[in-house]
Image (cartoon, rainbow, N blue to C red):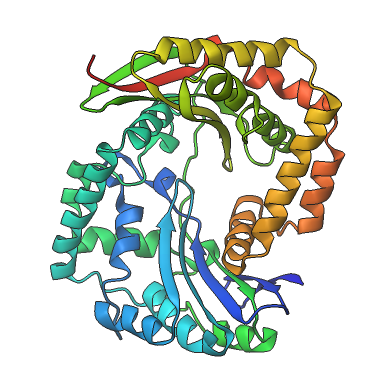
């Protein structure tokens, strides 16, 4: 059963009860990510995610993690372009004790000075680690170019310069101006008592401001023209990330595009895998994916190839884009791809954590819950004509921005 409740505080609960499990996943979401940051704040949302684990008015860092460990729970968080989520998974009998730690982190952070300085070093090492990962480098450069002129181009981790500039007062001001009750969602999935959950959360979050006093201008700049960018690093392989900008999440073309993306590069039988890897032996890994946000979207093809095979690999990818544009997709291929998407979706619904994330993200993005039956119906309603109508969004190779992070030749 899926239910959305707005508390008197303005915080929304989205509850998904599962009678067949003994665990529960609790996620506190905020409609805030790197897209909300100005140039001097880049990385502050992610840095705050780290700092909320470092102490509250009631607990120090060790007490936060130790209390969850003693309950056998699992706690973590993540920051993305548009949202931040803090979550815990525990046995249903430990719901209140786990939720208490989580809400204390959100409602009473102190951003201790000594921990702040240490955490700068930690996050800078995370930035360094990403810089050593050619896949991450290629994808970051691709996003920077696809979203040029938009807040979406801001890296979630920020830069060494911006992270080094953060102070207690800056974190405190940003946090309490952005993490407001009207922008917070609590997503719970698994085994729980509905009334107990409502009673627990009804008096929480009042230490936060009622509402955000400004609206982030999620501007949409003109789409960039296709281009090829090569970056040389001390690595043995070439890592390709290429893509084009897409439409937002609420566009009805989203599901046909997801199905088309799956046909092109979603699995072992996909066209890219069969041509680039199986037939021509040019890559171990090659795949395509989509990303959709409240105001924009992204289609990406990624491949890891030998550095002297980049041109051949790009030619093979272009072959498949051209073939997709010119050829009719068979009914068999279409139906197979749809069943793959439906299976993947249903498999994800069987995990309390995946379900909590799915529900929370949907409520933030769409302002409502989307039931599994709705998703399956939307997939079933896709026609071959729908697929053919979205081909033009991705099949023109010349529109793609191609990033090649490669080793020295």
Which of 251/242 is in front?
242
Give residue 176's position: percent from left, percent from top.
37, 65
Which of 351/309 is in front?
309
Give residue 74's position: percent from left, percent from top.
44, 74
State the quadrant of the N terminus. bottom right
Q: In this view of the protein, can residue 213 be seen by the observer? A: yes
At horizontal 49% and vertical 69% (from top left) the residue drawn is 210
Q: Is 230 positioned to the left or the right of 153 in the image?
A: left
Q: Is 66 positioned to the left or the right of 370 in the image?
A: left
Q: In this view of the protein, can residue 60 be seen by the observer? A: no
In the picture shown, does residue 212 fall above or below 308?
below
At horizontal 32% and vertical 69% (from top left) the residue drawn is 52
Give residue 243's position: percent from left, percent from top.
51, 24
Quadrant position of residue 116: bottom left
Which of 117/67 is in front?
67
In the picture shown, does residue 130 fall above or below 95?
above
Quadrant position of residue 130: top left
Give residue 114's position: percent from left, percent from top.
13, 69
Which of 14/312 is in front?
312
Q: Is 376 positioned to the left or the right of 397 in the image?
A: right
At horizontal 69% and vertical 16% (from top left) the residue drawn is 324
What is the tally of numbered marks visible in this picture?
0
State the quadrant of the C terminus. top left
In the picture shown, does residue 251 fall above or below 310?
below
At horizontal 54% and vertical 85% (from top left) the residue drawn is 95
């Amino acid at each position: 059963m899926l239910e959305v409740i707005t508390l008197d505080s303005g915080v929304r609960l989205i509850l998904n009860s599962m009678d067949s499990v003994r665990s529960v996943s609790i996620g506190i979401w905020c409609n805030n990510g790197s897209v909300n940051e100005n140039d001097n704040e880049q990385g502050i949302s992610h840095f705050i995610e780290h700092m909320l684990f470092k102490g509250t008015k009631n607990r120090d860092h060790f007490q936060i993690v130790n209390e969850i460990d003693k309950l056998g729970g699992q706690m973590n968080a993540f920051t993305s372009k548009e949202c931040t989520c803090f979550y815990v998974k525990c046995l249903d009998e430990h719901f209140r004790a786990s939720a208490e730690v989580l809400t204390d982190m959100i409602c009473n952070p102190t951003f201790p000075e000594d921990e702040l300085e240490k955490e700068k070093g930690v996050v800078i090492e995370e930035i360094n680690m990403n810089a050593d990962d050619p896949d991450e480098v290629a994808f970051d450069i691709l996003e920077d170019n696809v979203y040029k002129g938009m807040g979406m181009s801001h890296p979630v981790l920020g830069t060494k310069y911006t992270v080094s500039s953060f102070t207690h007062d800056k974190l405190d001001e940003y946090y309490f101006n952005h993490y407001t009750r009207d922008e917070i969602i609590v997503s719970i999935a698994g085994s729980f008592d509905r009334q107990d959950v409502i009673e627990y959360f009804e008096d929480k979050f009042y230490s936060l401001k009622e509402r955000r006093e400004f609206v982030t201008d999620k501007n949409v700049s003109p789409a960039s023209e296709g281009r090829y960018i090569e970056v040389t690093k001390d690595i043995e392989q070439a890592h390709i990330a290429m893509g084009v900008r897409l439409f937002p999440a609420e566009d009805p073309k989203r599901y046909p595009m997801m199905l088309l993306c799956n046909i092109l590069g979603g699995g072992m039988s996909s066209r890219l895998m069969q041509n680039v890897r199986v037939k021509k032996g040019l890559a171990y890994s090659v795949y395509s994916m989509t990303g959709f946000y409240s105001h924009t979207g992204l289609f990406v093809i990624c491949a890891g190839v030998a550095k002297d095979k980049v041109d051949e690999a790009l030619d093979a990818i272009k072959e498949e884009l051209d073939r997709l544009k010119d050829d009719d997709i068979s009914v068999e291929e279409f139906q197979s791809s749809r069943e793959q998407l439906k299976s993947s979706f249903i498999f994800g619904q069987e995990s309390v954590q995946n379900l909590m994330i799915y529900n929370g993200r949907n409520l933030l993005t769409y302002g409502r819950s989307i039931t599994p039956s709705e998703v399956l119906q939307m997939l079933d309603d896709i026609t071959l004509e729908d697929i053919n109508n979205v081909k033009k969004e991705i099949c023109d190779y010349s529109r793609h921005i191609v990033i090649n992070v490669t080793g020295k030749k």
